[in-house]
Image (cartoon, rainbow, N blue to C red):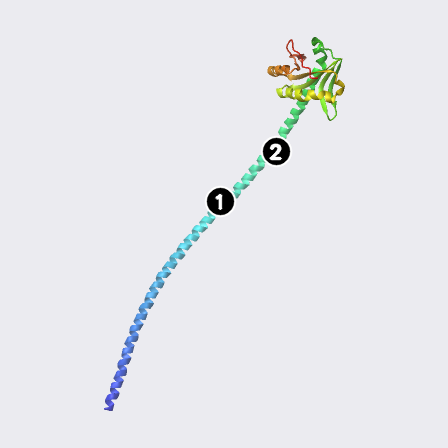
């Protein structure tokens, strides 16, 4: 009886062991399945990672190509800037040379203007005593470049016993010159030279070139108008019956 019980106990233990072994095997299989699934998921993740790396490598290559293009554009821009600087330098040099030439021309024209002015003054100064004989005016005292230092200067001043004639000389006569002479120069004459305060004050304007309409404008303003003749002499171009204005 006792032996029978011991035998059943060993069988129970063997059955339990087999049951536990089967259970462990089943759990191991389930664990293996989970592991296999995790491995598959890891492989998929690795594929995605590899693709991302591949895409990143592609982006890096594109970035490198873009950087190359950018570097080339910068290089090209630097060359363009250098070319522009060279062009600017040449332009400035040409401009400076042009300015120098214009300055020389300006000085030459200025010198020519001074020479012409002196020629005109000399022409009218030498002839003024003869020009006014037909106007019943004889000037015994004719001054050239009458001036008061720092105040005023008048080109030609002709004087007789009771008349002082002030003549302004220009190369080419213009209306604005006439206006300036009448409105500023003549009214100031007796203030600068009070010794002529009791004289009748007449005005005249002479120029190497006088257009008809400008000459008529000066005449209407009451001025004697002098100009050069075709043979290099001087003449009065006021019309017959002209009455000079007394600017006293």
Instruction: State the separation of the CA atoms marked 2 and 1.
Output: 34 Å
> With respect to residue 88, does 180 lie above or below?
above
Mark on residue 73? 1
Q: Earlier in the sequence, mark 2 or mark 1?
A: 1
User: Farthest residue toward the bottom?
Assistant: 1
Q: Which x, y percent locates residue 91?
A: 57, 35
Q: Quadrant of the N terminus?
A: bottom left
Observer-nearest of 192 and 91: 192
Question: How many residues crowd around disc 1 within 10 Å: few (fewer than 14), some, or many (20 or more)?
Answer: few
Q: Tag 1, which secondary structure?
A: helix
Residue 168 image point, x, y percent = 68, 19
Q: Nearer the viewer, residue 120 or 37?
A: 120
Residue plotted at (62% across, 19% down): 175
Determine which residue is flagged by label 2: 96
The residue that appears at 50% across and 45% down in the rendered structure is 74
Q: Any mark on residue 223, and which?
A: none
Q: Quadrant of residue 29?
A: bottom left
The residue at the point 55 percent across, 41 percent down is: 82
């Amino acid at each position: 009886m006792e032996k029978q019980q011991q035998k059943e106990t060993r069988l129970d233990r063997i059955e339990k062991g087999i049951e536990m072994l089967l259970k462990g095997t089943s759990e191991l299989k389930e664990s293996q399945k989970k592991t296999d699934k995790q491995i598959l998921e890891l492989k998929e993740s690795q594929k995605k990672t590899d693709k991302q790396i591949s895409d990143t490598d592609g982006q890096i290559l594109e970035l490198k190509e873009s950087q190359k293009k950018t570097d080339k554009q910068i290089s090209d821009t630097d060359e363009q800037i250098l070319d522009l600087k060279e062009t600017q330098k040449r332009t400035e040099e040409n401009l400076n040379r042009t300015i120098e030439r214009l300055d020389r021309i300006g000085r030459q024209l200025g010198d020519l203007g001074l020479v012409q002015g002196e020629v005109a003054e000399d022409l009218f100064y030498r002839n003024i005593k003869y020009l006014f004989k037909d106007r019943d005016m004889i000037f015994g005292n004719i001054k050239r470049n009458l001036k008061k230092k720092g105040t005023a200067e008048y080109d030609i001043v002709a004087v007789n016993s009771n008349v002082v004639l002030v003549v302004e000389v220009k190369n080419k006569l213009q209306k604005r010159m006439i206006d300036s002479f009448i409105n500023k120069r003549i009214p100031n004459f007796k203030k600068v030279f009070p010794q002529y305060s009791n004289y009748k004050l007449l005005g005249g304007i002479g120029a190497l070139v006088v257009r008809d309409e400008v000459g008529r404008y000066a005449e209407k303003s009451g001025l004697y108008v002098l100009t050069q003749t075709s043979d290099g002499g001087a003449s009065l171009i006021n019309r017959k019956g002209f009455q000079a204005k007394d600017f006293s």
